[in-house]
Image (cartoon, grey):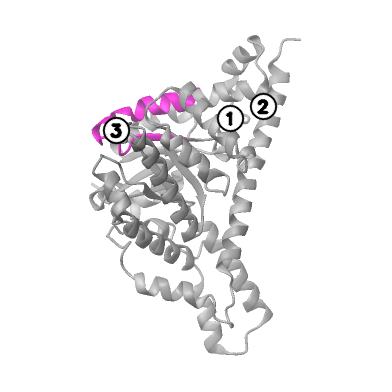
Amino acid sequence: MTTNHLLEIKQYGQSIWMDNLSRDIIQSGELQNLVENQGICGITSNPAIFEKAIADNAIYDADIEAGIEAKLPTYKIYESLVFADIRNACDILHPVYEASNRQDGYVSIEVPPTIAHDTQATINEARRYFQEIGRENIMIKIPGTEAGLPAVEQVIAEGINVNITLLFSVQSYINTAWAYIRGLEKRVAEGKDISTIASVASFFLSRIDSNIDGKIDAKLQRGVDDINLEARLRAVKGKVAIANAKIAYQEYKKIIESDRWQALASKGAKVQRLLWASTSTKDPNYSDVMYVDELIGRDTVNTLPPGTITACAEHCHVANRLETGVDEAYQLIESLKDPDININLNAVMDELLSEGINKFVQPFQSLMNSLERKVKLLSPV
């Protein structure tokens, strides 16, 4: 009998969530099987995932027709479809939520990406989503933008579980962690319980390597006279995202050792776990599970798309590697500043954040357009 390596990972203190959700996998029993037999203990979703799930899928037609009959605008029809899927997924995962003492069993839904730079609108939508979905194991996704972090602080203070998404730089993670802490501190100051609140900080990986590898390839294509420099440039490829994540984890350790965190922990606060996102390998020359194998470690989550789940179950090489090669990780990141390599990592991270928001806005708008067409098609003449 073959070993399911996904189940081994849990022994190292890491939870595996799935980066996918659709009505098909709910109704077919596939999600139930993944939870009960494959070690999947959470779900993340985003507008791109819902676009794939809903566009051109007849499974949603009856509910779309019900929305038309109720004279709902297209956006409200969209919400009715998505909220129903989220509630059903929450129900399937609720036993995990209870068995893990509220550590796992969460389903994440993102506030509309079009409000990523609007703090108050983000707060309002997070409150509304949390209330209308009505499941204690719901987690509201808020982008880690400059406008998003005050929203994180406020909704944490109100007792809403939050998944802070689109984190690329180590500093953006640090800022996120302190926003979570400030939210908990506000809640404590109001005499409220903090033991039931959970949060994850979604730190993106493969997009970093894709961006930096592209810059390295451009340098190599222009020609490099020095063979040693060429070797140094090639040594950077496919390494920056994992190094960056390992450094972020070291910052996590510093934060949870701080007096401010320890004061909250004594009142039952749960650590805000780092969640590794964007974990499908984009370059076929790299291992298809490298963003899993290299980042297994305590108090973390890895959210995997279905293809990576299958690959990892088959051939992940499971070991506690998150704190190996840490000195080398710092050296690699520092080497980017070398005049011969000359990659501005901060500029790359800013670029990726901007792109990341657009990568959610575009499918969201595309989904609204396709849903509008379907509404017209299904509407009675």
Magenta span of residues: 84-108
Residue position for label 1: 54
Task: Give the residue drawn at x 41%, y 60%.
Answer: 248
Work out how far the residue at label 3 is from the one at label 1, CA to CA, in angstroms.
27 Å
N-terminal of the pair, mark 2 or mark 3, is 3
| Label number found at residue 96 | 3
- Camera-nearest label, 3 or 1: 3
Q: Is residue 347 magenta?
A: no
The amino acid pointed to by label 3 is Val
Task: Give the residue drawn at x 39%, y 41%.
Answer: 199
Work out how far the residue at label 2 is from the one at label 3, CA to CA, in angstroms.
33 Å
Residue 150 x, y percent position in the rendering: 52, 43
Residue position for label 2: 371
Residue 301 x, y percent position in the rendering: 36, 48
Give the structural element (helix, strand or loop) at label 3: helix
Give the structural element (helix, strand or loop) at label 2: helix
